[in-house]
Image (tube, rainbow, N blue to C red):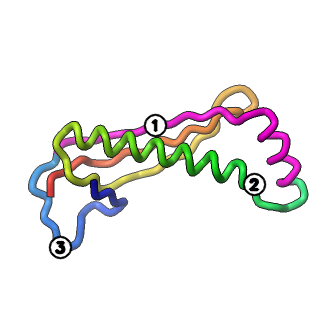
């Protein structure tokens, strides 16, 4: 599945628009991970724990997007938008939502 943030694909003609598709992932951050990430953030380092969780959530959402597009018969998704949100009590959950247009090239 070809997936791009651009509205078209160079050298390819969009034959058919199949509609908007989405993918979402919500992951809870572990209390101990939060504690260690907070300590690392205090001393100025990068929070590799949160970076890994963010990557994991993004991968899940993109995979879901691709699966939904494939179910419609698409071979590409164009115009992908990726949004990030922190949810829940004390911002303990991370949400990644992706959307795009399923197309046949």
Q: Residue at x 85, y 61 (%)?
A: 44
User: Where's residue 55, x and y in %?
Assistant: 57, 51
In the drawing, does residue 86 fall left or right of residue 11?
right
Mark 3 vs mark 1, CA separation in Å: 30 Å
Q: Which badge, 1 or 2, comes first in the chain's sequence?
A: 1
Mark 3 vs mark 2, CA separation in Å: 40 Å
Q: Which badge, 3 or 1, comes first in the chain's sequence?
A: 3
Q: Which badge, 3 or 2, comes first in the chain's sequence?
A: 3
User: Where's residue 93, x and y in %?
Assistant: 65, 33
Q: Quadrant of residue 8?
A: bottom left
Number of residues whose C-alpha sits closer than 10 Å to that of mark 1, classed few (under 14), some (14–19) or many (20 or more) = many
Q: Nearer the viewer, mark 3 or mark 2?
A: 2
Residue 23 in magenta stretch: yes
Number of marks present in the image shown: 3
Q: Quadrant of residue 30?
A: top right
Residue for badge 2: 47
Mark 1 vs mark 2, CA separation in Å: 23 Å
Q: What are the residue bounds of the magenta stretch?
A: 18-41
In the drawing, does residue 21 fall left or right of residue 41?
left
Question: Mark 1: which secondary structure?
Answer: strand
Residue for badge 3: 11
Question: Mark 2: which secondary structure?
Answer: loop
Question: Mark 3: which secondary structure?
Answer: loop
Q: Residue at x 70, y 36 (%)?
A: 29
Residue 39 in magenta stretch: yes
Residue for badge 1: 24
In the drawing, does residue 68 fall left or right of residue 93?
left
């Amino acid at each position: 599945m070809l997936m791009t943030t651009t509205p078209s694909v160079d050298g390819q003609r969009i034959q058919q628009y199949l509609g908007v598709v989405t993918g979402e992932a919500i992951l809870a951050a572990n209390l101990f991970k939060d504690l260690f990430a907070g300590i690392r953030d205090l001393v100025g380092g990068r929070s590799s724990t949160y970076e890994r969780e963010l990557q994991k959530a993004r991968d899940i959402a993109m995979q879901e997007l691709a699966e939904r597009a494939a179910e419609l018969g698409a071979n590409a998704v164009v115009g992908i938008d990726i949004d990030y949100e922190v949810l829940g009590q004390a911002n303990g959950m991370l949400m990644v939502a992706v959307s795009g247009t399923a197309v046949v090239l």
